[in-house]
Amino acid sequence: MGDISPDVLTLHSDNEEPHDSSPADSNGGMIAVAEQPPQVSLSLEATSETAFYLNKRRTLVIRHATGDRIVALIEIVSPGNKHSTLTVEAFLDKALAALRDGYHLLLIDLFPPGSFDPQGMLGVVWEHLAKESWEATSEQPLTLASYCAKSPVTTYVEPMQCGRTLPDMPLFLKTSHYINVPLEQTYAAYRGVPQRWRKVIEA
């Protein structure tokens, strides 16, 4: 299957109740979608054929050495992911495999669309999920997208532009509950990491 791994994992302990079976009062700070929908510009829902299509994709199982069940992934797109048709397809396979296996996904694409992803990585993924195109605008060519791995897949999208403060983005831990990820604070903290260690991390 190749050496494909997620950027950030959210794990679920085997000792906890799986999926949505925990009581409403034990959600650990998560936000209920029904009570407070994610604060993004767009909410998109994939077609009903998505589940069938995802099952046709190449199988990719992502596991953690501790044996804990993976709940969600955060994928930070790099220039390398956009480098060629092969790298774009590899990224697409990873995203679709994660959603097929029930892993919620937060996609952070802050690099301009290129020759191999003319509508950004959201466009690449959405075309395969919904069988329709996504049109990125020249004013806001960058995208943040949170995928809720239910059937059909629901995507919460925030178009972005250079210079704009990054908003908090929802990361789903259950199909009905999410947490907000403070992207701006996280990026600001990363700028304080010494250059030596940045090279180690980014390598």
Image: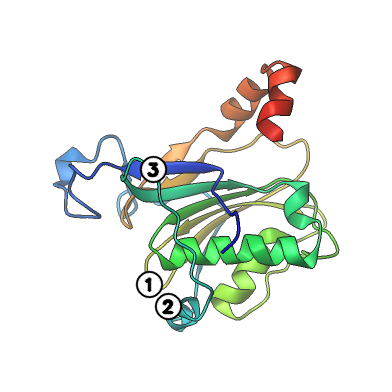
Labels 3 and 1: the sequence-earlier one: 3
Question: For this view, does 176 lie left or right of residue 125?
Answer: left
Up/down of 186 relative to 137, above or below: above
Q: Position of residue 89 (x, y in %)?
A: 68, 67
Label disc, if present, on residue 151 of the rendered structure: 1
Question: At x 64% / y 29%, what residue is drawn?
Answer: 187
Crowd rating for badge 3 (residues with CA inside 10 Å; few <14, some 14–19, many 20+): few
Residue named by callout 2: 51
Mark 3 lies on residue: 65
Number of labels in the image equals 3
Element under disc 1: loop
> Does the image show residue 185?
yes
User: In the rendered structure, which disc, 3 or 2, sits on the residue that comes first in sequence?
Assistant: 2
Is the residue marked by circle 1 packed among few (<14), some (14-19), or many (20+) residues within 10 Å? some
Q: Quadrant of residue 180?
A: top left
Q: Is residue 14 left or right of residue 72?
A: left
Q: Nearer the viewer, mark 2 or mark 1?
A: 2
Amino acid type of the residue tagged 3 in the rendering: Ala
Image x and y of residue 98, in percent: 47, 60
Q: Nearer the viewer, residue 32 or 64?
A: 64
Q: Nearer the viewer, mark 3 or mark 2?
A: 3
Q: Quadrant of the C terminus?
A: top right
Q: Is residue 39 visible?
A: no
